[in-house]
Image (tube, grey):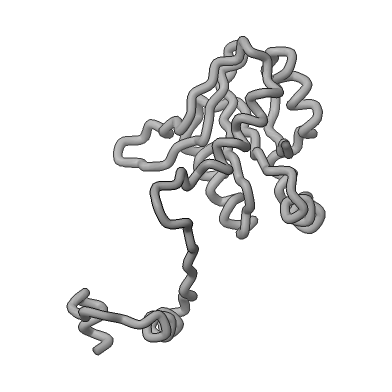
């Protein structure tokens, strides 16, 4: 039966069977539930970006879902602001679950997009994310050291933030 599942020949597989098979190779089954119908699945994500946009000078140019530009690479920044001559990339997270994966993803994007001068990790200001920052903020700030309040002040004035950091809104 297992080989039929691996070849995609099994007509049905229970969640329990799939979880057991994944456990054999050291993986854990994870699932998410979404409302039925045609909801905008990233509505909270877009609302988070809009909250930042409200705090940035109107003259700042924004682009959303900006590809890194490498041939065949599907990765994109959630937004890129053009401030003065600087490109400021924004990676928005409503509820990060894996800090190490987030750090790896940001480091790889920064490495592969040399045109970006600064990176802002944008977090929703929630109880979960405040706890995450208390527990893991030091590790995140090692790569994103500029204080969020200073980044926001510069962007509100239409100036380049001059560095990378974490902003909670």
Question: What residue do we see at 18% from left, 78% from top?
Answer: 9
Q: How many marks?
A: 0
Quadrant of the rendering where the C terminus is positioned: top right
Of residues 145 and 88, which is closer to you in this image? 88
In the figure, 122 relative to 85: above or below? below
Above or below residue 54? Residue 158 is: above
Residue most toward the bottom? 1
State whether residue 26 is above or below residue 137: below
Q: Position of residue 13 (x, y in %)?
A: 31, 81
Q: Is residue 167 left or right of residue 111?
A: right
- Asked whether 24 or 128 is in front, the reply is 128
- Residue drawn at x 57%, y 30% is 89
Name the residue rendered at 59%, 40% in the picture: 92
Q: Residue furthest left?
A: 9
Left or right: 1 as drawn, with respect to 139: left
Q: For residue 100, which quarter of the picture?
A: bottom right
Q: Position of residue 67 (x, y in %)?
A: 41, 33
Question: Which x, y percent locates residue 3?
Answer: 23, 84
What is the quadrant of residue 131 in the picture? bottom right
x then y, percent, for residue 156: 73, 18
- Name the quadrant of the N terminus: bottom left
Q: Is residue 152 left or right of residue 15?
A: right
Name the foreground residue: 152 vs 113. Answer: 152
The residue shown at (73%, 51%) is 129
Q: Outermost residue toward the front? A: 37
């Amino acid at each position: 039966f297992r080989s039929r599942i691996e070849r995609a020949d099994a007509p049905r597989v229970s969640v329990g069977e799939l979880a057991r098979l994944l456990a054999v190779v050291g993986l854990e089954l994870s699932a998410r539930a979404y409302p039925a119908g045609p909801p905008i699945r990233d509505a909270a994500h877009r609302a988070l970006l809009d909250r930042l946009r409200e705090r940035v000078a109107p003259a700042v140019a924004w682009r959303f879902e900006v590809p890194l530009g490498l041939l065949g690479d599907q990765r994109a920044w959630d937004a890129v602001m053009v401030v003065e001559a600087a490109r400021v990339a924004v990676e928005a997270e409503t509820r990060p679950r894996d800090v190490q994966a987030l750090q790896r993803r940001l480091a790889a994007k920064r490495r592969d997009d040399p045109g970006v001068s600064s990176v802002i990790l944008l977090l929703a200001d929630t109880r979960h994310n405040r706890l995450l920052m208390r527990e893991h903020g030091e590790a995140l700030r090692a790569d994103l050291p500029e204080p969020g309040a200073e980044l926001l002040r510069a962007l509100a004035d239409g100036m380049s933030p001059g560095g990378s950091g974490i902003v909670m809104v």
